[in-house]
Amino acid sequence: MSPRRASYHHGDLRRALVDAALRMLAAGGPELTMRKLASSVGVDHTAVYRHFADKRALLAAVAEEGYRALAAAMGRAAARAGDEAVEVLGACCGAYVAFGLAHPAHFAVMAGPRINEDERFPELEAAIAATLAHLTTAIAAGQATGELRTGKPLDLALGLWSLTHGYAVAVAQRRIAVRSTRVAVSYFRRLAAPMLAGMAR
Amino acid sequence: MSPRRASYHHGDLRRALVDAALRMLAAGGPELTMRKLASSVGVDHTAVYRHFADKRALLAAVAEEGYRALAAAMGRAAARAGDEAVEVLGACCGAYVAFGLAHPAHFAVMAGPRINEDERFPELEAAIAATLAHLTTAIAAGQATGELRTGKPLDLALGLWSLTHGYAVAVAQRRIAVRSTRVAVSYFRRLAAPMLAGMAR
DNA sequence: ACCTGAACACCGTTCAAGT
DNA sequence: ACCTGAACACCGTTCAAGT
C-alpha cells in the first residue's frame, strides 16, 4: 500500500504491474483499477498505458497467467491420479474447482465477461485451450483403452468442462455454499459421478 | 433515446426504470448506467435513488425479473415434453440454454458477479431457487417411477444445473461458438446425454 | 524510451433545495 | 412525496511535456 518510489526506468514495469494486480486480487480488497494498480507500484497512473493498450489488455494478461497456473494444476492432478481415465478426469476437474476456490477474484477475471471477444489476445486463447486439452487428451486416452465410450473427444470434453466450470464459478461466487475447498471438491466429485459414469461404457 | 418529458409524478417510475433497463440490455448497446437509465425515461439521474437504494438494488430487480421469466420458460418446456424424466430434464435445461442465448446481456446480469452476496434481496434468491426447483421436482418424480437412480434430488439437480449453467454462460459469452440458438440447444442435448444417461438407472 | 501532469468525458452517490 | 441541481470522489483514456 505504501507507494514504492523505486524507479522502473529500465526495470520490468510490465511484470511488476501484473504481479501487483495478482496481489490486489488475492488481497480480496477493493476493485482492481488502473489508478490503484499504478499507485501500488509507485508509478503515475498513465504509465500503465506504456505497457498495456487499455484495461482489457491488462486483464487479458492477468487472465492468461491464471489459465497457465490452472493448466499446470490440472496437469499435476492428472499425474498424481491412477491410470483409469475416469480417475484422471475426476482429478483434473477437481483441481479446476480447487483453483477457483483458492483464487476467487483471479478466477472471476478469468471466467467473467469475455476479455478476448474481438480476438485481440491470441496468447490468452492458447492458455484457455491448454486447460481444455487436458480433458480431451485424457478422454481420447480412455477411449483408446476402451474404458470410455466412443464419440468426439471434444464433445465429451466440453460437457465435462461445462459441468466443472459451472460448478467452480457457482462455488467461487458463493452461490453454492461450502465449508472448505476440500468439501467443495469432494462434493463436486459426487455431482460429477453421473456424468463420468455415463461416459464410461 | 429521445428523453421523454412525461412526468412520473404519481406514475410508476420504478416499473418504468426496470423496463427501460431491460430494453437497454436487449438493445445490446452501451453499458447499463444509472445516468443513462434515468435519462432514457426522461428523469434526472438522482431520481433513481428514490426507488433503488443503489445500483446493486436495480440490478437485483433486473436479475429477479430474468429468473422469473427463465423459470416460466423452463416450466413451459417441461409441460411440452413427454413424461419420461430424462426427456423433461433435457427439455428444461434446453430452455435454460435457449434463454441465455436469446437474452445474453440480461443473462449476464443474472449470472455475473453475485448480486445477493449480503442477502439483501430475498426475492431474488427465491426466483433463483424456483429455477432449481424445476430440476429437483422432475428428478424426484423420475425417482418415484424408478426411472432415475436414487440419491438426494438436490445433489443430482446441482450437477445438472452446473452443467446447464456452465454451458449457457459459455455460449452466451461466445466462448463456445454456435451458429444459432437451435444448434446451441441441440448441441447441449448431446453434451448432456452422458450425464442424463448416468442418472438413469 | 519511459514517465509525469493536466485535462476530458464520464461514473455512482449524496444532499440541500424546489414543487 | 417526488424530483432537480450542484457537488464530491472517483473512473479510463489522451496528449503535450519533461528527462
Image (spheres, coloured by chain):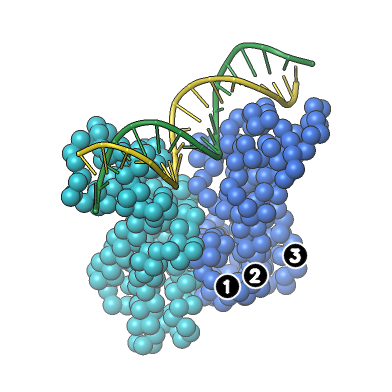
Chain colours: A blue, B cyan, C yellow, D green
Residue for badge 2: A181
- The answer to whether residue B37 shows anywhere in this view is no
Q: Residue at x 54, y 56 (%)?
A: A154
Return the disc, 1 or 3, that comes first in the chain's sequence: 3
Q: Residue at x 60, y 45 (%)?
A: A32
Q: Residue at x 40, y 64 (%)?
A: B121
**Frontmost residue, A45 versus A57:** A45
Report the chain holding disc 3.
A
Quadrant for residue B98, please give it.
Answer: bottom left
Local crowd size for mark 3, using a 10 Å CA cut-off: few (<14), some (14–19), many (≥20): few
Image position, residue B77 (x, y; %):
28, 66
Same-chain status of marks 3 and 2? yes
Return the disc, 3 or 2, that comes first in the chain's sequence: 3
Residue for badge 1: A178
**Frontmost residue, B59 versus B46:** B46
Mark 1 vs mark 3, CA separation in Å: 27 Å
Q: Amino acid at mark 2?
A: Thr
Residue for badge 3: A79
Image position, residue B49 (x, y; %):
35, 48
**Frontmost residue, B41 versus A136:** B41
Mark 3 vs mark 2, CA separation in Å: 20 Å
Local crowd size for mark 2, using a 10 Å CA cut-off: few (<14), some (14–19), many (≥20): some
Image position, residue A130 (x, y; %):
65, 51
